[in-house]
Image (spheres, rainbow, N blue to C red):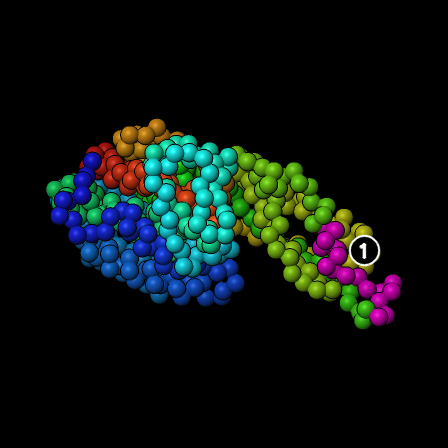
Amino acid sequence: MLERSAQSSFPSLVDRFVAYARIHTTSSEDSDTYPSTERQFDLARILVDELQAVGLADAAVDDNCYVTATLPASLGCEKVPAIAFISHMDTYPEVSGENVVPTFHENYQGGDIDLPREGRKILAAENPYLAECLGETIITADGTTLLGADDKAGIAEILEALTRIHENPDWRHGTVKIAFTPDEEVGAGVKHFDVEAFGATVAYTMDGGQRGEVENETFCADSAIVTFVGRDIHPGYAKDKMIPSVKIAGDFLAGLPRAGAPETTEGLEGYIHPISIKGNTSETEVQLLIRDFEADGLAPKAKMIEEHAKAACANWPGSSYRLEIKEYYRNMKYDLAREPRAMAYALEAVERAGMKPIQGSIRGGTDGSTLSARGLPTPNIFTGEQDFHGYGEWICVKDMELATETILRLIEVWTEKES
């Protein structure tokens, strides 16, 4: 294990995380710019300075808010394939990420965790993983915002690993590439990312949950946009003439079964999820997410959406609908299978760090889904973040330390096996 220098002048792992969490970097789904919010540059510029301070001289941020940097291989390790670690800087847009107040709960002894404001609690019954954190320090927000461990914990862990390497110059390692991305939470994290120029053989997103878990599987994802077309007319003269598209959309939504929705599925089950509705009497648009772990499972769900759209229109003679299906991302397991070292070495690193490796699946997507499809195999490694995207987000400091150790052990495994 690489230890910090007793005379280290760099912030601790926890201090880095707290500093990052306090920076407002929320992305936006309604923006037409890239990145979606200018404030993400506030963190990006800080990270460039911090990367340079630990010896990554080429650290820079580009116009798209991608922070990239390279740790050159140590002498004799130049032929080890370059590996990368990636985390995203933005936070989930539907819960406030402004004025975050990281709050410490030391020596956790079980039970619910009271948050300081708004009367909110983190319920132990809804967070069984808390039982793995007895006696440890838990960090939460204060109840008025999310915490931002998703994914600022990953950033802090990467910087901590680089700090330890910097302070132990005799430690052997291959080339390590770093990338911090914007807009992951709005599905555009690597929209403009140049995989070929980046120059890594394998990458790892640091953006997972419980200790020991490495994820090699995501949903296959499409979106559906159903536009219902009615007929508008002055409501005072509407009898037997008006066809209100908003009501047609309401019939459509009411007809979708609860079975196969996010609130009734888990594990490897897919779902159909209406996420927005907008329109007027003439036209109303409903947007839905379609998710399945198998690519073949998407088409039947799209067909079900169309059948319910037809049924809704049948109740309103003279109405019609338009259906558009957009491909989003695919399960990264198909691409990772072509580079078995990516997962094998990650699982070995977890074991070397003193944990039981857990191979898991993500009920969502990561930047790694798109990167893997573009030829950069990118599994996802735990950071410790829990109950993210809500006011009850929390993280255990022990898990952050173990994630840092896993990064170091992973660099070690690649160096030993590929020298």
Q: Is residue 5 found left or right of 69 in the rendered image? A: left
Residue at image x 72%, y 50%? 252
Q: Is residue 337 above or below residue 100?
A: above
Residue annotated with mark 1: 316
Q: Quadrant of residue 64?
A: bottom left
Q: Is residue 331 visible?
A: no
Q: How many marks?
A: 1
Question: Callout 1, which amino acid?
Answer: Trp
Q: Which residues are magenta?
A: 236-252
Q: Is residue 211 left or right of residue 249?
A: left
**Dot 1 crowding, Cα within 10 Å, few <14, some 14–19, many 20+:** some
Q: Secondary structure at mark 1?
A: loop
Q: Residue at x 52, y 43 (%)?
A: 220
Q: Position of residue 18 (x, y in %)?
A: 33, 52
Please say whether residue 344 is one of the residues in the magenta stretch: no
Q: Is residue 69 visible?
A: yes
| Left or right of 59 in this view: 253 | right
On screen, 100 above or below 268? Answer: below
Q: For the C terminus, give its image quadrant.
A: top left
Q: Measuring 74% from the left and 60% from the top, which residue is drawn there?
A: 245
- Magenta-drawn stretch contains 240: yes
Residue 59, percent across and down?
25, 58
Residue drawn at x 13%, y 48% as measured from the top left: 7
Question: Which residue occupies the extreme right position in the image?
Answer: 240
Dividing the image into 4 quarters, which one contains the N terminus?
A: top left
Q: Position of residue 95 (x, y in %)?
A: 49, 54
In the image, is residue 179 above or below residue 342? below
